[in-house]
Image (spheres, helix red, strand yellow):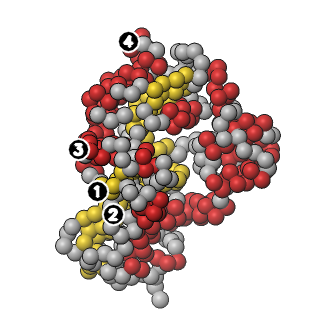
Amino acid sequence: MPARSSTAGVEDAECTILHVDMDAFYVSVELLTRPELRGRPVIAGSPSGRSVVLSASYEARRFGVRSAMPMSTALRLCPQAVIVEPHHSKYAEVSRAVMEIFGRVTPVVEPLSVDEAFLDVRGSLRRLGSPRAIGEQIRSTIHRELGITASVGIASTKFVAKIASTRAKPDGLLLIPADRTVEYLHTLPVSALWGVGSKTQDILARLGIRTVEDVARTPVSVLQRVLGATGTHVHRLAWGEDPRPVTVTRQEKSIGAEETFAADVADDDVLFAELLRLSHRTAARLRSAALRAGGVSLKLRYADFSTITRSRRLAEPVDSAHALYGAVRQLLEALGDRPMSVRLIGIRAERLESADGVQQLTIDRQDDNWRLAEAALDRVNGKFGASMLRPARLLRRPPEAGGSGSSIPSPDR
């Protein structure tokens, strides 16, 4: 097994938080039964219609191929890539095995998705050795037992551990000692900060802020003026401040809603309207549970009872119907021409995480306005009954959409 590990300094027993992330997980699982494709650019995803990339091998990534990219774009960038159909049952099986390996190391495991998790190994040091030794043991065990590779980041905080695992990819380990955390962070571009996307980068660049150190040296008042409340959060991250513990959660893995139509539906407008309604129902459940979704999936059941699902990871965790609907609508559009009418449609919010005490990092005023509006809907509907207020598009429900799900009454004329 290739072993590539490094530290940013001497071993540090204070660094008891590990972020373990599988390398190109979906493709890696597919290669277990297709070893002849190793070393070649491989893309997991459907080659038909306007589908998106589920995962890409590192050979394909060198051509610019990325997850969630339209397949047409990926094939334009890397026409020699081999496309493999995804097998979600296999991914779930390997994921369970990965999590079982984590459980042997420590009971304090916080899964983030099927292929990554935070581990707090504070209670395992006496039994298993230093944090670095534990990280190497995890990597070795995963490769030996499952035949895939993982990258490990080790630090004193979750935020820095996740940065470290990203910088260690593929198939590596990086430890950032506690007393050198700030020094290391200040060598990174501003995009390394959690939640700083392209829009935020553009705004900061206009102020001459391009690195994490630039953010740290900028007065909080200046950051607040251009980023709002997010400015304070970004400034704290730039100094390595992240008090969040690794939390063992027993929360739902996903939250969703679906509708079975009274008559099969072929009209896109009807399907889009129903997705909007289901997005609002799902988002309201997220907010009531103080959760946010890092991914979304679409479910379709056709007239012949065949069922398909499509999913994508979101750029940042969300709890608004506006964001969920935008993502799931793209999934529906990406299917292209459907083979037959639709009997059932559903949406699921996935990759759930707690929203308590976490500032959602966005500087898009429109996003803020949608969240405020939906929060107001929650308060009104909570006081006067569900669906007293809803988007204008849903005031008159299409006649085709009256099935087993919760119905929305038409307004009195």
Given contact means CB atoms under 8 Å apart, are the residues at marks 2 and 3 in contact?
Answer: no
Q: What residue does disc 1 label?
A: 85
The disc labelled 1 sits on which kind of residue? Glu
Residue 180, quarter of the rendered image: top right
User: Would you call the spot at circle 3 few (<14 residues within 10 Å), some (14-19), or many (20 or more)?
Assistant: few
Q: Earlier in the sequence, mark 4 or mark 2?
A: 2
Neighbourhood count class around disc 2 (C-alpha, 10 Å): few under 14, some 14–19, many 20 upward:
some
Q: Is residue 33 left or right of residue 185?
A: left
Q: Residue at x 38, y 12 (%)?
A: 127
The reply to whether the C-beta atoms of the residues labelled 3 and 1 are less than 8 Å apart is no
In this view, 371 is above or below 231: below
Residue at figure coordinates x 56%, y 29% from the top left: 157
What number is the disc on residue 33? 3
Pinpoint residue 253: horizontal percent, then vertical percent. Answer: 36, 46
For label 1, the SS is: loop
Report, in whole angstroms, how far the alpha carbon at label 1 lies from the one at label 4: 42 Å
- Work out whether 42 lies above or below 304: above
Q: Which residue is mark 4?
A: 127
Q: What's the distance in space between the residues labelled 2 and 3, CA to CA? A: 19 Å
Q: Nearer the viewer, residue 327 or 53?
A: 53
Task: Say which residue label 2 marks.
Answer: 47
Element at label 4 = helix
User: Camera-side residue: 96 or 273?
Assistant: 96
> What is the C-alpha distance between the residues marked 4 and 2?
48 Å
Query: For the N terminus, which image quadrant?
Result: top left
